[in-house]
Image (spheres, grey):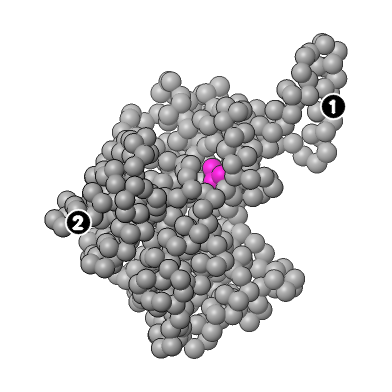
Amino acid sequence: MKSVWIIDDDRSIRWVLEKSLARENIEFKSFATADEALRALAHDVPQVVVSDIRMPGSSGLDFLQALHQHHPLVPVIIMTAYSDLESAVSAFQGGAFEYLPKPFDINHAIELVRRALEQSRRKSGEAVDVDVSANILGHAPAMQEVFRAIGKLAQSQATVLINGESGTGKELIARALHRHSIRASKPFIAINTAAIPKDLLESELFGHERGAFTGAVTTRHGRFEQAEGGTLFLDEIGDMPADLQTRLLRVLSDGNFYRVGGHQPIKANVRIITATHQDLDERVRQKLFREDLFHRLNVIRLRLPPLRERREDIPLLAKYFLQKSARELSVEPKQFSDTTLRHLATQDFPGNVRQLENLCHWLTVMTPSQMIEIADLPPEWRDKSTAAVDGGDWSAALARQAATALQRGDARIMDTLTAQFERTLILQALHHTGGRRIEAATLLGIGRNTLTRKVQELGLDNQEG
């Protein structure tokens, strides 16, 4: 059975990845150097590779180049220091599936490995059992409208635009549209256009020819070619740079595209599904998004309701995610009391379904009893009045708390209240982004390293879900 290869001279990194992959029942092999892995290639082939970029002897990029000369379809995830932009660019240009900045979140790393495994199996012809419909649950009328739309679009080739807040499950809907379409036997390729640096996005979408730029040592197929005959899902399309909007419009208009550095047109036989949390109509008015591209994409529009608009679905989803977390962790599933379910149904869940799933995972790990009561919830979820503060009330509440502390003669009042303020902001940002630290840091206007340091200082590591 093919396995995931881990290549890193740092023993602690190998150990963390090994333990996490073992917990997920994913086969793996570890190598302390790229040279060891190169020797192993003589008699074995990995399914996915996770490799450091700089090691004694051959580098991760050397291994990537050698691997892709004979096995170009094996996805390689390159690990690199966060500040090492040139290495990241070289990794993508060399044909890496993805790059993983250090220090990394282990859950994010495992999710990348799973995506790479799915791509590897699909390209090698193996069957992939991806159950996406289970996560799309709901009795609410708004969700029933979405389900009906998916059914009506089953035999359609129409371009679909999905609108919805972060965490509402836009990619799940896109996958369902693909799975129920006549293209279901062909690839479903997803790309978050906001998550890839602008300089790399063009190559990521359209591929590049060998020698197109420094570091382009091999020809690379972009996402359009990978999705041939199937569906290409472009998430966060509202953030696409203007020049890429022009190129995408050209593809949608004449059905052809060129690889970076290429001169021969390539026919694009893909169905386009796009998604955004933004108001594209408003971005068009602000001249931030091309009007002609908007009309090309806005053939069929689906709106995914936020969780606060379908509160009747919260108990159903909560019970499902609790069961799912138990299966993933191989533990006995816990249960919510009726009181807890009624309490959760009153919460706003700014991070929507993803935030509810993260909360259920946290409860599966952290709750000692089998029956989950309100007291077992994280502190910020126990009292609805503390879950959200409207308008300017927070400043009045802060003034009252400061006055009380001053009357008591508390020490280090500034430090204490500042820590509480930062704690609240960071937790809410992480809830909003579903635990994605880079996105949370961007929204807060601080650096990722600063956010990571504050998470550690404030003891929030176990409360991000």
Q: Secondary structure at mark 1?
A: helix
Which residue is at 55% across, 62% downward? 197
Q: Main secondary structure of the magenta part?
A: loop
The crowd level at tag 2 (other Cα within 10 Å; few <14, some 14-19, many 20+) is some
Query: Splitting the image into 4 quarters, where does residue 402 fall?
Result: top right
Residue 227 included in the magenta stretch of the image: no
Query: Residue 16's x, y, as percent?
Result: 36, 36
Residue at numbered disc 2: 41
Whether residue 269 is visible, yes or no, is: yes
Q: Amino acid at mark 1?
A: Ala
* Residue depicted at 35% across the width and 72% down the height: 218
Q: Report the mark closest to the observer, 1 or 2.
A: 2
Work out how far the residue at label 1 is from the one at label 2, CA to CA, in angstroms.
Answer: 65 Å
Residue 399 is marked as 1
Magenta region, residue range: 433-437
Is residue 435 one of those drawn in magenta?
yes
Relative placement, left or right, of 138 versus 284 is left
Q: Which mark is residue 164?
A: none
